[in-house]
């Protein structure tokens, strides 16, 4: 899996996701427009129903009040001989009587406001519209005959939701009922809300899954590259001491070479140092394997941390002095006894001091200091090394990660030490952080509490 393939996959997934989002947005917009049209049609249908009910009601009231209504209702029992006029004549008399009555009746009386409000609300509720609406009744010349309190009659006059009242009125054009739904947009959004929420949830799930997939691919690629680097570094690191030991052994066994006491001591010391180096390499790999398997166990004992620091510094001071530097110790902690694992805490200090020596661009000047409070003891290892860029500081505790050094390859290691250091500190219930600036050195600080969790507690976070 090369970089070009990963880049192509990322680009394809991103384009697919953008296309999906665009389609979803357009579909949602069209659905909201359709819902808006449906709501408008429901309002129009409600207005038509109100107009029809008003017209039927008025017709029935006028018929019941006309003197010919009873004659027409009893017309089936009447005979043509007894009555001078038949049923058709009665209907004609009623019709012209009603017309004569309406000619003298104000139009405002034909639409009672309470009745209009009641009918309008009932018809809208039957169609699922419970939001209050504003309405107005306009006369033949646009005169406002009735309107909702506080309504803007200009807005109502321009409303597309309008219907003529009394369309069968023989008097000609009459009243028009106009309605405005102030919360129409909110009603559309409310009706679409379940669908919008489901669409958004599914879209977020898809985005999250794709992001996780891409991160996993990139992470696996990075781990693969790091492991390849580890194998290469490990091969190189093992070959060097093995070759040195082999050459020293051949020199000791070569009868043609003079074997003075000084030369013999030199070769023996060389073999001892390279053997110790091999042991450190193997130990680092074993520590990483134990950490990965979750079998790292902390066996706490009553421990004088100052004494432990003295022992580690005494053993490692020679490495700093060989490069013209030194290690300074400053004990400021009033309380320095903790419950800790001697072996693991020794390895922590050795790793931090060894890194401080290796990453020094000049004579290594290292300072180890301690402080304490009522929570625990703090140990800081400060150096004058090359420093760590801020962008790399959050990753230095990751397993197998090494800060890039460009074309400089004089620093040995596999990126296992700081991961192990962090795991040990966390197993002791503490925490570790770094403060560094490129070219100005680094300070690694870790805290060990006086009381902490069990020795089998798994560490959290990275590492």
Image: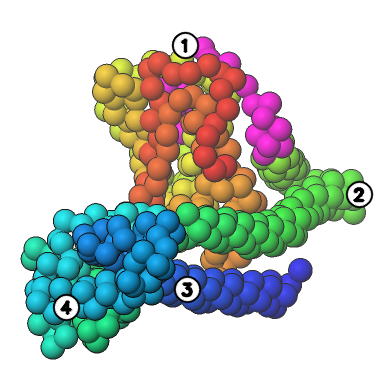
* Residue tagged 2: 255
Q: Are marks 2 and 4 in contact (CB under 8 Å)?
A: no
The answer to whether residue 278 is left or right of residue 406 is right
Give the number of the disc on residue 34: 3
* Residue tagged 4: 100
Q: Are marks 1 and 2 in contact (CB under 8 Å)?
A: no
Between label 1 and label 4, give the one nearer the viewer: 4
Classify mark 3: residues with Cα within 10 Å, few (<14), some (14-19) or many (20+): few
In-front residue for pair 194/270: 194
Asked if residue 298 is positioned above or below residue 224 in the image, the reply reads: above
Q: Earlier in the sequence, mark 3 or mark 1?
A: 3
Magenta-span inclusion, residue 104: no
Q: Earlier in the sequence, mark 2 or mark 4?
A: 4
Q: Secondary structure at mark 2?
A: loop
Residue 370 image offset from top left, x and y in percent: 32, 30
Between label 2 and label 4, give the one nearer the viewer: 4
Q: Residue at x 9, y 77 (%)?
A: 104
Residue 420 image offset from top left, x and y in percent: 58, 38
Residue 164 image offset from top left, x and y in percent: 28, 79
Q: Earlier in the sequence, mark 3 or mark 4?
A: 3
- Magenta range is 287-313
Asked if residue 11 is positioned above or below residue 350 in the image, the reply reads: below
Give the number of the disc on residue 302: 1
Q: Are marks 3 and 4 in contact (CB under 8 Å)?
A: no
């Amino acid at each position: 899996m090369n970089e070009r393939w990963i880049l192509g996959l990322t680009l394809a997934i991103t384009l697919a996701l953008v296309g999906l989002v665009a389609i979803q947005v357009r579909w949602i917009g069209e659905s909201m427009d359709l819902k808006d049209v449906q709501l408008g049609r429901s309002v129009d249908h409600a207005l038509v129903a109100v107009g029809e009910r008003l017209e039927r009601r008025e017709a029935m009231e006028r018929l019941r009040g006309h003197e010919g209504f009873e004659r027409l209702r009893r017309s089936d029992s009447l005979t043509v001989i007894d009555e001078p006029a038949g049923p058709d004549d009665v209907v004609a008399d009623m019709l012209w009587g009603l017309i004569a009555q309406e000619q003298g009746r104000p139009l405002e009386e034909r639409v009672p406001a309470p009745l209009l409000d009641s009918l309008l609300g009932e018809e809208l509720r039957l169609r699922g519209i419970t939001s209050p609406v504003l309405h107005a009744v306009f006369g033949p010349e646009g005169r406002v005959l009735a309107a909702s309190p506080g309504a803007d009659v200009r807005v109502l006059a321009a409303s597309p939701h309008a219907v003529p009242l009394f369309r069968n009125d023989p008097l000609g054009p009459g009243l028009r009922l106009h309605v405005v739904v102030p919360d129409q947009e909110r009603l559309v959004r409310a009706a679409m809300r379940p669908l919008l929420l489901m669409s958004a949830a599914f879209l977020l799930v898809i985005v999250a899954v794709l992001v996780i997939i891409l991160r996993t691919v990139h992470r696996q690629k990075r781990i693969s590259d790091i492991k390849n680097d580890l194998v290469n570094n490990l091969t190189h690191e093992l070959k060097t001491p093995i070759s040195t030991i082999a050459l020293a052994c051949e020199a000791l066994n070569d009868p043609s070479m003079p074997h003075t006491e000084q030369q013999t001591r030199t070769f023996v010391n060389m073999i001892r140092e390279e053997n110790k180096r091999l042991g450190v390499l193997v130990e680092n790999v074993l520590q990483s394997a134990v950490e990965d398997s979750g079998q790292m166990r902390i066996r706490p004992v009553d421990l004088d941390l100052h004494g432990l620091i003295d022992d580690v510094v005494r053993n490692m001071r020679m490495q700093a002095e060989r490069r013209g530097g030194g290690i300074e110790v400053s004990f400021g902690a009033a309380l320095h006894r903790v419950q800790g694992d001697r072996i693991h805490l020794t390895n922590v200090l050795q790793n931090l001091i060894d890194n401080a020596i290796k990453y020094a661009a000049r004579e290594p000047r290292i300072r180890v200091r301690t402080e304490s409070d009522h929570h625990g003891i703090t140990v800081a290892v400060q150096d004058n090394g090359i420093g760590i860029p801020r962008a790399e500081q959050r990753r230095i505790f990751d397993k197998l990660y090494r800060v890039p050094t460009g074309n400089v390859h004089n620093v040995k290691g596999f990126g296992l030490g700081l991961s192990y250091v962090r795991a040990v500190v966390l197993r002791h219930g503490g925490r570790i952080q770094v403060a560094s600036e490129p070219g100005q050195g680094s300070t690694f600080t870790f805290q060990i509490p006086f009381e902490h969790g069990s020795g089998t507690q798994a560490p959290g976070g990275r590492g």
